[in-house]
Image: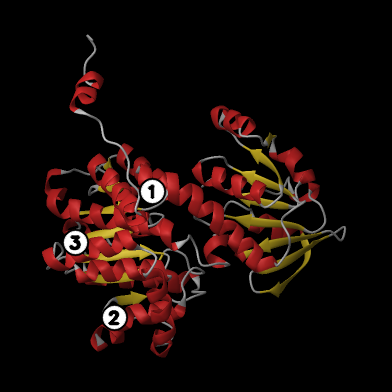
């Protein structure tokens, strides 16, 4: 473990006790992963396998990585966002025997070096969040491609990139779309993002949400969660969408629907959840109220056009951690939260532990599936097998002490027949 810690690139190994206390806390609230851990300890499915992980390095992630290690994996870890790393957790992870390359607030060149560092173990498998490891393996580190047997992707943004690669026949190994499993997006994306985004906004600003107008840009599962929680906090919620079906959903869920050029004049808080760039852009800033808050909950810091905002500003200054003030020529002030990065992780602790219990359980079982089946798969994006998806939700119900009904043989036969 000491040699692993020495190989790591972290802020300060002496922070480990604080980080381990955080890990111990979330571990007590992640019973599904705890059950999988016992299976992994006994079966050692990853013995002799090297796994590189690129995820948000906070306590829940650390516990997940430790579970993989207890299943026999030689693991390395880096961050999928420079502002989501918690330095004490990274130290605890390194102390536990995982090679870690991450530091909170890493500069772009340092962040790229961390990605390279995580790939230094020459992984057999990868677990990605946003596609950074996949991208590096297919560009600057193609020398490692032959050794990678497969991987799993956590986010909508990453899967969009993977599907484009697969369509162009550029993807060189199988990737499992963990984000698209029902036990992930129905809970992680909706309830996890919905709660953690508001945790981040409120922690950064210490302002009340009730009575304010909130513009949610994007009404996918993450946007649905953000809008629902904003409504529950007492906000008036408006939704901006480009998809007519999702716009109808938002309308029938009770939210106002309008284009950004109109919402820009009304909202006190903007939260982007699209996965696309410049959805809040230069044409919108001049329309906004004095004091409007700009926050992003998409994976990359491109949804609010920070470059245009900086160019338009007559002055800018940091006010407190997580808030930067941009003063426009007419004196109006716009406040960018968490540098336009994921507000729920850059200004908060991310999704609740109980939600990530299901997501990381899926990741763990998906990795086990890849070990058993990667040789039969090609360079495509594959769904999580339905039995694994159902297993995670069933384990969650068991942990909650809940029981549900099961189909009788007669009902199974009825559903399987058309001539009855």
Q: x and y percent of residue 405 in the render?
A: 30, 37
Q: x and y percent of residue 396 in the render?
A: 34, 52
User: Could you say which disc has been placed on residue 419 in the image?
Assistant: none
Asked if marks 2 and 1 touch (Cβ < 8 Å), the reply is: no
User: Could you say which disc has been placed on residue 96 in the image?
Assistant: 2
- Residue beneath the point at 44% across and 74% down: 110
User: How many residues crowd mark 2 within 10 Å: few (<14), some (14–19), many (20+)?
Assistant: some
Q: Give SS at disc 1.
A: helix
In the image, which is nearer the foreground, mark 1 or mark 3? 1
Q: Is residue 88 above or below residue 204?
A: below
Q: Is residue 408 above or below residue 229?
A: above
Between disc 1 and disc 3, whose residue precedes?
Answer: 3
Residue where numbered disc 3 is placed: 124
Q: Give SS at disc 2.
A: loop
Between disc 2 and disc 3, whose residue precedes?
Answer: 2
What's the CA distance linking mark 1 and mark 3?
24 Å
Compared across the picture, whether 365 is left or right of 19 comes to: left
Compared across the picture, whether 47 is left or right of 307 comes to: left
On-image quarter of the C terminus: top left
Asked which quadrant contains residue 35, the reply is: bottom left
User: Could you say which disc has been placed on residue 184 in the image?
Assistant: 1
In the image, which is nearer the foreground, mark 2 or mark 3? 2
């Amino acid at each position: 473990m000491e040699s692993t810690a020495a190989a790591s690139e972290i802020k300060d190994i002496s922070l480990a006790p604080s980080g381990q206390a955080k890990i111990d806390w979330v571990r007590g609230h992640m019973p599904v992963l705890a059950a999988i851990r016992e299976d992994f300890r006994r079966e050692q499915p990853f013995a002799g396998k090297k796994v590189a992980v690129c995820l948000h390095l906070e306590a829940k992630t650390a516990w997940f990585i430790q579970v993989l290690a207890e299943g026999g994996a030689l693991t390395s870890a880096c961050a999928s966002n420079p502002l989501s790393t918690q330095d004490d957790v990274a130290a605890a992870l390194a102390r536990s025997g995982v090679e870690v390359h991450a530091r909170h607030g890493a500069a772009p060149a340092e962040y790229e070096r961390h990605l390279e560092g995580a790939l230094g173990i020459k992984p057999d498998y990868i677990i990605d969040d946003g596609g950074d490891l996949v991208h590096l393996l297919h560009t600057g580190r193609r020398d490692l491609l032959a050794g990678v047997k497969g991987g799993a992707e956590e986010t909508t943004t990453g899967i969009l990139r993977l599907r484009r690669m697969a369509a162009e026949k550029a993807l060189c190994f199988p990737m499992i779309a963990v984000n698209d499993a029902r036990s992930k997006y129905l809970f992680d994306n909706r309830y996890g993002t919905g709660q953690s985004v508001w945790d981040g906004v409120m922690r950064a600003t210490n302002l009340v949400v009730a009575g304010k107008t909130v513009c949610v840009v994007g009404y996918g599962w993450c946007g649905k969660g953000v809008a629902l929680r904003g409504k529950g906090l007492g906000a008036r919620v408006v939704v901006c969408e480009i998809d007519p079906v999702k716009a109808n959903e938002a309308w029938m869920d009770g939210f106002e629907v309008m284009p950004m050029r109109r919402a820009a004049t009304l909202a006190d808080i903007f939260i982007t959840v699209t996965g696309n760039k410049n959805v809040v852009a230069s044409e919108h800033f001049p329309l906004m109220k004095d004091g409007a808050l700009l926050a992003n909950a998409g994976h990359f810091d491109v949804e609010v056009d920070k470059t245009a905002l900086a160019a338009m500003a007559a002055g800018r200054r940091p006010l407190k951690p997580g808030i930067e003030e941009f003063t426009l020529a007419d004196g109006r002030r716009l406040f960018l939260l968490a540098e336009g990065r994921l507000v729920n992780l850059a200004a908060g602790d991310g999704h609740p532990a109980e939600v990530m219990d299901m997501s990381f359980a899926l990741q763990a079982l998906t990795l086990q599936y890849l070990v058993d089946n990667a040789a039969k798969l090609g360079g495509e994006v594959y769904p999580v097998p339905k039995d694994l998806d159902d297993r995670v939700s069933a384990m969650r119900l068991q942990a909650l002490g809940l029981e549900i009904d099961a189909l009788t043989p007669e009902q199974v036969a009825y559903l399987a027949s058309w001539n009855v």
